[in-house]
């Protein structure tokens, strides 16, 4: 099958397939006489395996290693268990971070429970205090506002 057919069958796009090939997650297919890539069922299976790992938010490196383990009959599942344990630890850490973020947002939301002019909005006032390096409602003194915060998706 051609790359577009593989993409449709796996529910992904062509660029993702090309990226996975460049990253070594998906083996390069043979070429037809006319130069087209000729993907087989093994490519579809591998692509679905990777996408399944990604649906569990696993890093690509882990998906690659798990894929290698799946086709290596000379190893035990201990390596797979270690990868999952490490991923679970990352998930638990992220849950903790998200719970802390939830509390910050609840504190911020509590600053403005009714309709006000924006000049009187407690949320905007607290955010502006943080922008000026002052104490704000959503950050404790032990966790001051860091404008270059690692949690800022624009700077991640």
Image (cartoon, rainbow, N blue to C red):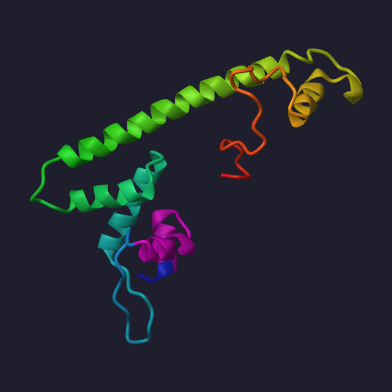
Most foreground residue, 134 or 26: 134
Residue occupying the point 61% across, 38% down: 152
Image coordinates for residue 49, horizontal then vertical, percent: 31, 50
Image coordinates for residue 130, horizontal then vertical, percent: 73, 27
**Span colored in magenta:** 4-23
Q: Is residue 15 magenta?
A: yes
Q: Is residue 85 magenta?
A: no
Q: Is residue 109 left or right of residue 15?
A: right
Q: Is residue 53 above or below residue 143?
A: below
Image coordinates for residue 100, horizontal then vertical, percent: 55, 20
Most foreground residue, 147 or 10: 147
Most foreground residue, 109 or 155: 155
Q: Is residue 41 left or right of residue 128?
A: left
**In the rendered view of the protein, which quadrant contains the C terminus?**
top right
Q: Is residue 89 left or right of residue 105?
A: left
Which quadrant holds residue 109?
top right
Residue occupying the point 35% across, 70% down: 1
Dominant secondary-structure state across the stretch colored magenta:
helix
Q: Is residue 112 above or below residue 133?
A: above
Residue occupying the point 37% across, 50% down: 60
Which quadrant holds residue 21?
bottom left
């Amino acid at each position: 099958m051609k790359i577009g057919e593989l993409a449709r069958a796996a529910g992904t796009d062509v660029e993702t397939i090309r990226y996975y090939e460049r990253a070594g997650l998906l083996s390069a297919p043979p070429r037809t006489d006319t130069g087209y890539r000729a993907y087989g069922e093994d490519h579809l299976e591998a692509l679905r395996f990777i996408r399944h790992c990604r649906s569990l938010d696993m890093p690509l490196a882990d998906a690659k290693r798990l894929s290698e383990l799946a086709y290596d009959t000379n190893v035990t599942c201990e390596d797979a268990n270690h990868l999952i344990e490490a991923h679970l630890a990352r998930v638990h850490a992220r849950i903790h971070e998200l719970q802390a973020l939830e509390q910050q947002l609840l504190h911020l939301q509590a600053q403005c429970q009714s309709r006000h002019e924006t000049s009187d909005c407690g949320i905007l006032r607290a955010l502006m205090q943080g922008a000026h390096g002052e104490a704000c409602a959503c950050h404790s003194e032990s966790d001051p506002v860091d404008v270059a915060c690692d949690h800022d998706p624009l700077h991640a």
